[in-house]
Amino acid sequence: MLIEAKGLKKTYKNNKGVRIEALRNANVAVRENECVGLFGSSGSGKSTIGQIMVGLLPPDEGSISYRGKSVKIPYGKGIRREIQMLYQHPEVSFNPKLTLLRSLIEPYQLMGIDPSRERILEDNYRFGIYAEHLERYPGELSGGELQRAALARILVLKPRFIVLDEPTSMLDAISQAQVVQILREIQKETGVGYLFITHNKALCQAFSSRFYRIREGITEEVSSL
């Protein structure tokens, strides 16, 4: 198993100090080269699972294992690089005061890869990001362009597991299809595992090979939605 979450529990306090059970008993497992769908309504706890599995949020109870070994949050440097997240709102991935080129350079420097403009253009061509996009600021790009650029930047880090947190919900139908097609191609090439978090039943069934449904913080693996 690539990554597995068992018995996750998480409680928050709202702005009135009332305790809210986001997760009561959540279990999710993803193999390499697999896309697992996590389907649920707004507020069901599905994004909380994603944040825990990428190491952004510690659970109150439960465990995470990665490649067969128990891991603790925060993750170590190597695991942190191999586990990434593509967000619903791609603009949160970019500094609004930096051009797209300056934002894309960072992972190249982190990985010790040539961060030249020519290299970045070559790598981003398949994502529909061209020379004219690189000098623009995030506010000057469409949601689809930002999401494709966010995915391109993640892939420089060579992740083994990516949480896709409603990655197409804010996009139009054409951009949605483009992002899904790129994700499929990348998985075929690299064997990366995906957890696809969504409230879109049709898209979840079309894109995923196994499914979990979450209701009131409790997950259940189901054969269909």
Image (cartoon, rainbow, N blue to C red):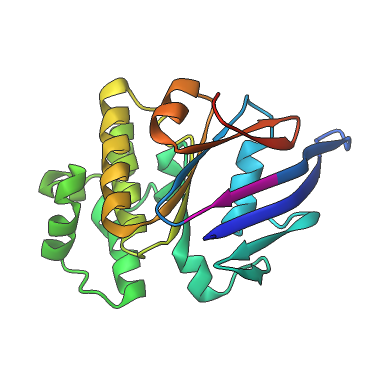
Residue 25 x/y as whole percent:
78, 43
Q: Up-down: is 195 above or below 110?
A: above
Kindly give the residue lying farthest to the front in the view shown. Answer: 223
The magenta segment: 27-31
Majority secondary structure of the magenta segment? strand
Residue in view at x 31 percent, y 73 percent: 109
Indicate left or right for 52 with 32 as reference: right
If the image is split into quadrants, where does the N terminus sit? bottom right
Q: Is residue 29 magenta?
A: yes
Mark yes or no: residue 99 visible.
no
52 and 135: which is toward the camera: 52
Residue in view at x 34 percent, y 49 percent: 151
Residue 159 x/y as whole percent:
40, 62
Q: Is residue 112 magenta?
A: no
Q: Up-down: is 24 above or below 93?
A: above
Mark yes or no: residue 119 visible.
yes
Indicate left or right for 121 with 101 as reference: left
Kindly give the residue lying farthest to the bottom in the view shown. Answer: 112
Residue in view at x 83 percent, y 36 percent: 20
Q: To which quarter of the image does residue 216 belong?
A: top right
Indicate left or right for 132 with 151 as reference: left
Residue 163 x/y as whole percent:
49, 48
